[in-house]
Image (spheres, rainbow, N blue to C red):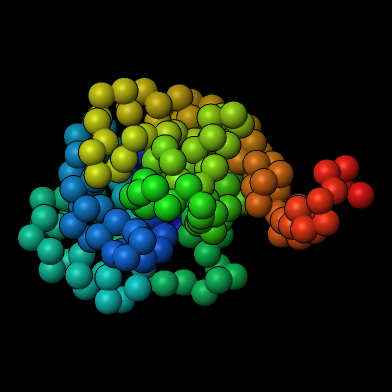
Amino acid sequence: MRIRKELGLKEGTVLVYVGKFGGIYLTVEEYLRFVIAVAPIDPALRFLIITSARSLEELRRHPLFSSVEDRIVLQPPVPADELHQFLSAGDIGVVAIPPTPSQVYRTPVKSAHYWAAGLPIMVPAGVSDDHRIAVVEDAGIVVDDLRTVQPAGLKEAIDRYMELDPEVRRDRCIKVAMKYRDTGMMVSLLRDLLTGRSDGA
């Protein structure tokens, strides 16, 4: 609540994105088009973006920005040990990666950050196994593609998470982070794969 107050975020639901734009991520224009498509479903919906100074300037200069600037809060990069505090000011973490064929072989670090901060994710189908985990563990919203997202049904999906007790939502997501993205678990899994063992010993 302290961070939300400092950032001028109101009481509505906050979709947070932390990371880069372009390359393997959505471009600034693609993300702004996503915001424009989703913003009308709820006038209280806000979008927190934590990114580099260069990307912040690109966002501010983009012709589409003025149409949604009252819904967006821009935040420069924060120290790694403070990131979780800023993520906690959000309600749902956005994985802004286009679901190209190669993305199935990735494991985005940002999903782990969101879950560890207690946030369900919004993720395109086909990005790593994050979309499967989101469904199986009920820890996120799966869309076909943020670039072509259809607002119909999205408000209901968002509201379903927001109606959960915050502690229940937070604990569920943190457990998912530890179950699937704990680095100790990753080392054990890699060792088992390399040795051909499946008993976890």
Residue under the point 18% across and 57% down: 29
Q: Is residue 8 visible?
A: no
Q: Residue 82 in the image: state x and y as whole percent.
A: 55, 68
Residue under the point 92% across and 49% down: 201
Q: Residue furthest front?
A: 196
Q: Residue 98 in the image: state x and y as whole percent.
A: 33, 50
Q: Residue 22 in the image: state x and y as whole percent.
A: 29, 64
Is 3 displayed left or right of 22 in the figure?
Answer: right
Note whether 165 is above or below 91 in the view shown.
above
Q: Nearer the viewer, residue 193 or 174?
A: 193
Note whether 154 is above or below 79 in the view shown.
above
Residue under the point 47% across and 42% down: 121
Q: Residue furthest left?
A: 63
Is 174 displayed left or right of 100 in the figure?
Answer: right
Q: Nearer the viewer, residue 70 or 126?
A: 126
Q: Is residue 58 visible?
A: yes
Is 111 displayed left or right of 73 in the figure?
Answer: right
Residue under the point 44% across and 41% down: 126
Q: Residue 183 in the image: state x and y as whole percent.
A: 71, 59
Q: What is the tally of numbered marks visible in this picture?
A: 0
